[in-house]
Amino acid sequence: MMALPGGHHLDPIPLQGQRLHFMQVDSVQRWMEDLKLMTECECMCVLQAKPISLEEDTQGDLILAGGPGPGDPLQLLLKRGWVISTELRRIGQKLAQDRWARVHSMSVRLTCHARSMVSEYSTISRTSSQEMGQAEKLLMEKCSELSAVTQRCLQVENEHVLKSMKACVSETLSMLGQHFGQLLELALTREVQALVRKIDTSDNIYIMESTTGNLFSLTQEGAPLCRIIAKEGGVVALFKVCRQDSFRCMYPQALRTLASICCVEEGVHQLEKVDGILCLADILTDDSHSEATRAEAAAVVAQVTSPHLSFTQHLTSFLENMEEIVTALIKLCQEASSGEVFLLASAALANITFFDKMACEMLLQLNAIRVLLEACSDKQRVDTPYTRDQIVTILANMSVLEQCASDIIQENGVQLIMGMLSEKPRSGTPAEVAACERVQQKAAVTLARLCRDPHVAQEAVRLSCISRLIELCRSPSERNSSDAVLVACLAALRRLAGVCPEGLQDSDFQQLVQPRLVDSFLLCSNMEESFV
């Protein structure tokens, strides 16, 4: 991870196999660029009179595959930054293993990469501030200090002396990481400022498109960069774009970038300052905007109302516009032409039901249950467990309302909820498996809440919900060994058993209903697959 000041870290670029963004360039040109970077490292090793190591893990040495494009300081910073931060982490690992030869050779290579980053960035940017110059000086001094002290360690054989020197190396490495983080943050801030200035001042649609795309790419590099963008006015500039009719074609891209920035507190605060919620409400309620634009606006709403973010719970402007937003989102769900659009709109609705309980009453008045349950039979709109997760979340939160039960029965909702108890992943990826677990858990929670109403309970019994709940409790594979699903199913089973005790065998009643919930949970969570 790239260390940033204040204890923040920048995760390695999240790309396939943790590789970097590569530009599509001619293969010979790329080889020439690679050669330059490779020979720099090797020359440095020779100049330091250190042979290239033959240890088994040298094959993992980092070499930049393709340099940044000409005049592209952002790609330079991200690529070099990723390499240097990874080298810092690896040096720390070798230091912990007391592998001094590797620590020194990697320190030399780290110095090479740091010097290359400073030199190349200075060449591209052409101007430098006093603060940047000071940060560069401190970084290179620490790199030299690390190389010198690790070289001395190679000549020491006394273990007690080495132990004391190890603490010194560790401290130097830590300080080097801090100086690197400060320099990287200063450089990235400078580049973000330039991008925001372009968005703020340009009236050229092509420049705007390119610049906004670059800003969006930066948001994908992690929360630290999102904080920098928010602090440097990125949210303000993007909402300025979304308020100009001449840039309507830019709205989807600008909104997508805003949704990414608002994953951090600074982004949400900036959104609140510029009346961003009102702007989103205007876009969502204006049918003249394209579906893509309204879907991206829904994505921003989903982000700023996320129940996982505590700092979004005090958006007073959202409460003022909630009715218009909820109405527009239900309409977007109803008219969605694709699964992606429906997912974004339903995710926003699901988060809003956590955000404020009045939203559930609004949804009930807007016939949301009918809209959502009808969508479940439309494979074009609802075709993944991720989408069903949003639908069942809304139903679970609405089921606390007494009036919800009659609407569920009227729309044949109990049968659909019963089907969600059998949600299975198609691909087996961890994300999809987790989504299926959430669907099962929330379906059981919804049933438990709705079965307060005798009519719902009777319908659930008629549809054999009891036998499915028992199966989920007793068979870990049916619930992917999820404890959350088990607890929800036990609660739903106990609620149904109160209405129809004759639906359970004696052994089921004695093991799953009669004991304390925690005892039944411990019994089921320790069951073997062969137990029936």
Image (spheres, rainbow, N blue to C red):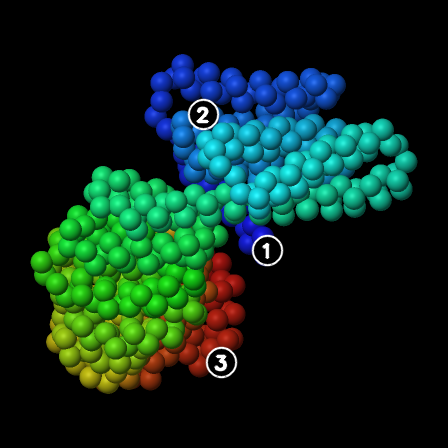
**Label 1 or label 2, whichever comes before in sequence order:** 1
Q: Which residue is mark 2?
A: 66
Residue 439: in sight, yes or no? no
The spot of residue 187 in percent (x, y) is 50, 43
Gap between marks 2 and 3, in whole Å? 63 Å
Q: Residue at x 72, y 21 (%)?
A: 48
Three-letter residue code for mark 2: Gly
- Of the 4 image quadrants, the one containing the N terminus is top right
Q: Residue at x 29, y 73 (%)?
A: 318
Q: Which residue is mark 1?
A: 7
- In the structure shown, which secondary structural element does the residue marked by tag 1 occupy? helix
Name the side, left or right, on which 518 lies relative to 463. Answer: right
Three-letter residue code for mark 1: Gly
Between marks 2 and 3 in the image, the one whose residue lies nearer the viewer? 2
Between marks 3 and 1 in the image, the one whose residue lies nearer the viewer? 1
Residue 118: in sight, yes or no? yes
Q: Residue at x 45, y 17 (%)?
A: 31
Gap between marks 3 and 1, in whole Å? 45 Å
The spot of residue 198 in percent (x, y) is 32, 45
- Of the 4 image quadrants, the one containing the C terminus is bottom left
Q: Is residue 204 above or below residue 251?
A: above
Circle on res. 516 = 3
Circle on res. 492 = none
Q: Residue at x 25, y 48 (%)?
A: 253
Looking at the rendered structure, the number of numbered marks drawn on it comes to 3
The spot of residue 420 in percent (x, y) is 27, 63
Name the side, left or right, on which 107 lies relative to 322. Answer: right
Q: Is residue 460 above or below residue 85?
A: below
